[in-house]
Image: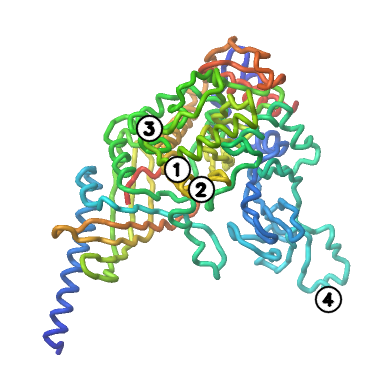
Amino acid sequence: MTAPADRATALDALLLQVEVERFFSAESELLDERRFDEWLDLLHEDIRYWMPIARNMRFDRPETEYTRQGDEACWFDEGKDVLRKRVLQIQGGDHWAEEPRSRTTHLVANVRVEAAEGGDIAAKSRFVVSACRLDHDVDLFVGKRVDLLRREHGALKVLRRTIYLDQSVLLSRNLTTFF
Amino acid sequence: MQMTDLIDIDEGTLSREIFSSEDIFRRELERVFVPAWSFVGHTSQLARGGDFFLSRVGPEPVIVTRDEPGAVHVLLNSCRHRGMPPCRYDSGNAAGFTCSYHGWSYGLDGALTGVPKLKERYQGRLEREKWGLIRARVCVYYGSIWATFDDALPSFEDYLGADMRFYLRTLLQGPDGDDDGYEVIGGIVKWQVPCNWKFGAENFAGDHYHGYSHISVERLSIGLSGKTSRHNFAAAKTPRQAMSVADPLRGHTIRASVYKALAAYDPQEGAPDAVNDYYRACHEARQRRLGDRSRLMIHGGVIFPNTHFNSAGRTTIGLWLPLGAGRTEVWRWLFVPRSAPDIVKDTLREYYLRYAGPAGMVEQDDMENWTAAQRGTEGMIARKYPFNFQLAMGLSRGAREDEWLGSEVTITEDVAEHNQRAFYAHWARLMAGA
């Protein structure tokens, strides 16, 4: 029989788990419905959006497997100003890599809340993103995500997003999808 | 296969077949990619003895190493016993490489150093000096490393020719005009595009014409500061003449501009003061160092056949690696000036990431267009109709008033398909067995 205090703690953790999972689901919904302006609203003004490049390195140098933030070449390593421009680019009808638009499906799974302190919540998850465009093109992106969410005025915002793609050489011609 | 049926340089037409035929592709591997020098990397990737990284020479995987005395080697990454790659790490530091299949070991210079059961079962008859890794010829040119497996090819300097030696040396000068002025940012960007390698090559060779591809980024201000046009040179107020420069004997091409006057530095609007201060000092140092030649700005180009580069404030060098008639792998090295303070290196790095490669807001539209163009080469009806390369035909000039632009190159000013015609003319000569 769980003590009442432990039960309250467990319930708090469960509620937080559900809140984070719902947040990620809602985010996926906005991306897949191409409601990019509303998606941007879920990102903190100081967000760092980072997708390093995977390399094939020796077993005893795991810290070098993914390229470093702020220093090495990455797929993405940017703030909200650039993300906003990417959205504006897609919305203009003249960004040929997304015109006509891709059809995307974002699945976020295995969500684990790693830490919650003050208003900050660290969460790990896995993603599968399918992006189909034109008649035949299918791109599949699979990997891990590490997020730092910050609660501001009661609402969660993404303050740091790290996206570890499993592919090393990117087997798709473009990364026009958000993760 | 008659090349004259596929390509007519005088008419400016080119068969779509050369992008989609697997027969032509296999012939290219033999006739275009073997007799070629290829960029494989940069000495800044090999700071210490024992440093190595993987690269490619055409379709061939290679290990690029620095041995303990300091010499640079380029080795075919293929064990002489069963062909396994003895090196399976993208980069690192090692005393040598041991094949994971039967354990044959090689030194940083490719020498066969270890063979299991050498004495007992080879009975002293294995001639180790004959069974080292296949070594490429290597040339280090102002920090850039080049390699070929073709013993009959001229030296790299002669392969470039006098004029391209000047352009490549200029490309590798830092913004202050100092030789070998760049270092590579860690992490090589690698991706695949479902199109023929020549779509990328001809675009980098001389396409001043495809502004329409990139209209979306022109309205978004993604330049160095993130507050101006995608090109840093848009800030310059001095008039300049854009031109296509080609070496018709060797197939190398350069996209360039020449400013009409030596002028003061025009700042990048919105960039941090420290960034403008650095580039102003470099601009002045370059003018002092190079004099009249500092009016030259290289936008990019191709060292025949598949080494490509961009410049004009974004120095990147890359390879179009041929995987099949309709599939290409792209490798891209990003460079920052050695002498720059961190804030300049950081600003440049972020600029590259939002500009170039499959996540770059500019090049995404190139990849999309080349992929679509590839499909336009596949139909039996479509293949009956050649592509058009007639832009600015007959408007080429030979010698120019600026003698330092070169005596062997030909030049067409403004938008032209001058360079693409030179690229394909040389390609056709090699394919015909010339």
The tag earlier along the polypeptide, 1 or 4, is 4
The tag earlier along the polypeptide, 4 or 2, is 4
For label 2, the SS is loop
A108, above or below B401, in the image:
below
Structural distance between the alpha carbons of marks 3 and 4? 70 Å
The residue that appears at 14% across and 58% down in the rendered structure is A153
Task: Kindly identify the amino acid type of the residue bearing the numbered disc 4.
Answer: Glu
Q: Position of residue B400 (x, y in %)?
A: 65, 14
Structural distance between the alpha carbons of marks 2 and 1? 9 Å
The residue that appears at 55% across and 17% down in the rendered structure is B260
User: In terms of depth relative to the viewer, which is nearer, B198 or B394?
Assistant: B394
Badge number at residue A157: none
Chain of the residue under the numbered disc 3 shown in the image: B
Task: Kindly identify the amino acid type of the residue bearing the numbered disc 2.
Answer: Pro
For label 3, the SS is loop
Of labels 1 and 4, the one closer to you: 1
Q: Which residue is mark 3?
A: B228
The image quarter containing residue B359 is top left
User: In terms of depth relative to the viewer, which is nearer, B343 or A140?
Assistant: B343
Task: Kindly identify the amino acid type of the residue bearing the numbered disc 3.
Answer: Thr
* Circles 1 and 4 on the same chain: yes
Residue A12 in the figure: left or right of residue B28 = left
User: In terms of depth relative to the viewer, which is nearer, B313 or B58?
Assistant: B313
Asked if the residues shown at circle 2 and circle 1 are in contact, with their CB atoms under 8 angstroms apart, the answer is yes
Q: Which residue is mark 2?
A: B341
Structural distance between the alpha carbons of marks 4 and 2? 59 Å
Q: Bin the neighbour count of mark 4 within 10 Å (Cα to Cα): few under 14, some 14-19, many 20 and up.
A: few
The tag earlier along the polypeptide, 3 or 4, is 4
Chain of the residue under the numbered disc 2 shown in the image: B
Structural distance between the alpha carbons of marks 3 and 1? 17 Å
